[in-house]
Image (cartoon, helix red, strand yellow):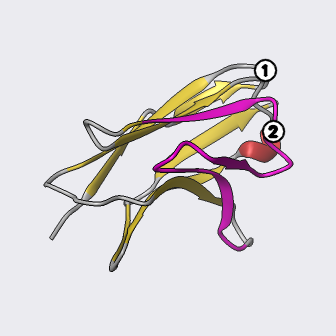
Amino acid sequence: QVQLVESGGGLVQAGGSLRLSCAPSGSIFRINLMGWYRQAPGKQRELVADISSTGNINYAASVKGRFTISRDNAKNTVNLQMNSLKPEDTAVYYCNVVGPRYSYWGQGTQVTVSS
């Protein structure tokens, strides 16, 4: 069973930056989509950004211009650079990897932005 290992979360002041990383613990083949989701207390999980195997990228409107998603196809890793963080970005961030017949989720990493 493949596990996704996330790192880079933490506490930061508003206006600061964090970089999240996600890497699989085992081999994964034919990844189609890699992305980051987040879930704030009392809210549904929402897409933050995703990137396809061909490099097509989607961002949530709330993070466009502040966050940058990138992936390394050779290492099967996905990163999320978060700049100009706001208190409303506070949430648990989850990595997601989707292939033809699988969808894996990370355990989540807490991001807290103080005002």
- Seen from the viewer's position, the closer of residues 110 and 57 is 57
Q: Nearer the viewer, mark 2 or mark 1?
A: 2
Q: Residue at x 67, y 60 (%)?
A: 47
Q: Which mark is residue 15?
A: 1
Q: Which residues are magenta?
A: 44-71
Looking at this rendering, what residue extends furthest in the front direction?
54
Q: Residues within 10 Å of mark 1 (few under 14, many from 20)?
A: some
Q: Which mark is residue 64?
A: 2
Q: Which mark is residue 57?
A: none
Q: Residue at x 62, y 57 (%)?
A: 38
Instruction: Report the label total.
Output: 2
Looking at this rendering, what residue extends furthest in the right direction?
61
Position of 84 with respect to 27 (left or right) is right
Q: Position of residue 33 (x, y in %)?
A: 48, 58
Position of 103 with respect to 60 (left or right) is left
Examine the image and state in which quarter residue 28 appears.
bottom left
Q: Is residue 38 visible?
A: yes
Position of 78 with respect to 36 (left or right) is left
Position of 31 with respect to 83 (left or right) is left
SS at badge 2: loop
Q: Position of residue 1 (x, y in %)?
A: 15, 71
The relative height of residue 103 versus residue 107 in the rendered view (above or below) is below
Q: Tell me which label, 2 or 1, sits earlier in the chain.
A: 1
| Callout 1 amino acid | Gly
Q: Residues within 10 Å of mark 2 (few under 14, many from 20)?
A: few
